[in-house]
Image (spheres, grey):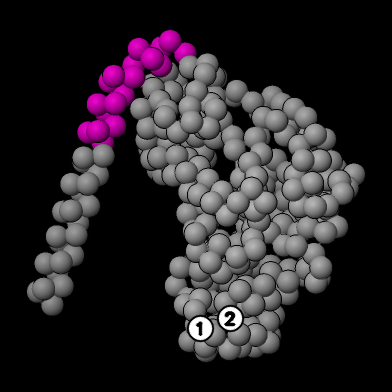
Amino acid sequence: MLTAHPKLSVPQEAWFLGRIVSTVDRSRPVDASAMELIRNAIVNDALWGGLQTSDTVDRILRSVMDQTLDCVIDAIFRGCGKGIPEGVRWGEKSPRHSHIVSKLQKIFPGAIFVHMLRDGRDACASMAARGWYEGSFRRICEHWTTCVLSAQSAAQAGHDQYIEVRFEDLVTDPDRELKRVSKFFRLEVDARMLDHSRLATEEIPNAGGGIHKKLLRPLDAGEIGKWKSALTYWQEAIFLAVAGKVARDVGYGCGHRLGAWALLPLARINVMIEKALCELKARLLASRIFRGRSIS
């Protein structure tokens, strides 16, 4: 919806960005060795790797050799794919990058953060349906919790650089929410933002497939509250045990079913046991690796 605005562009998720931001020194110009790391991250990216040739990536990176990391990243976004002209603000939308908010703020001090919040029960039900974390619903709930808390840390930049948008508000009253977000960007609302499903294939190459399969559909209020049929009482109880406090803090603490409340004490015990077993497994694995290195 944002990328439908002529002054905004939010292309395909750039999963490579996290690797670049976490490994390349932002305090000095990007040298040849760092450029090689950046190049490999882009061409091997699951989503961006097939959007442009390695020659295109090489050409873009050569043009910004020995410049600062913010200039390099800006050149990548503007030069890859369809290209983003100067004067158009680009964005990145991978939820996983909520964990590197503080690093992104240091690289791009003027960055604006739009935090899309959704009922954690619906979000976790969606992730579970896709088989995230090998089906561990506890880990899925932990992922939602850490993403929410990490994303909210961007609020420290100030109210003019951080805004929260609730999924439920967007699908029930998109016109109002888009006006609010456009005002935040200091832009006028563009009618094309409400026609995102038609424009999706123009902006995102594989729209309609995989994680983007719903982009071709109109907004649907029926997506709200699907957890009531998608989650078992036990899964809901696990959510309460892991993410209940965060959900309440962000305004999603109501409507839990009695069956889940009844199972909550057992769910809390289960979560503690699972976490303890995971920690034990990690220690044993680390010990084996250490012994292996010692022997060699």
Q: Earlier in the sequence, mark 2 or mark 1?
A: 1
Q: Label 2 vs label 1: CA separation?
A: 6 Å
In-front residue for pair 204/161 = 161
Q: Residue at x 69, y 69 (%)?
A: 77
Q: Residue at x 21, y 40 (%)?
A: 276
Q: Is residue 36 above or below residue 221?
A: below
- For mark 2, does the 10 Å Cα neighbourhood hold few (<14), some (14 to 19), or many (20 or more) residues? some
Span highlighted in magenta in the image: 257-274
Mark 2 touches mark 1? (CB < 8 Å):
yes
Q: Residue furthest right?
A: 191
The x and y percentages for residue 68 are: 58, 81
Badge 2 amino acid: Thr
Mark linked to residue 210 = none
The x and y percentages for residue 114 are: 65, 48
Task: Determine the main secondary structure of the stretch shown in magenta.
Answer: helix
Badge 1 element: loop
Badge 2 element: loop
108 horizontally vs 100: left or right: right
**Residue 151 in view here:** no
Instruction: Name the residue tied to disc 2.
Output: 68
**Residue 275 in view here:** yes
Asked which quadrant contains residue 224, the reply is: top right
Badge 1 amino acid: Arg
Q: Residue at x 55, y 62 (%)?
A: 105
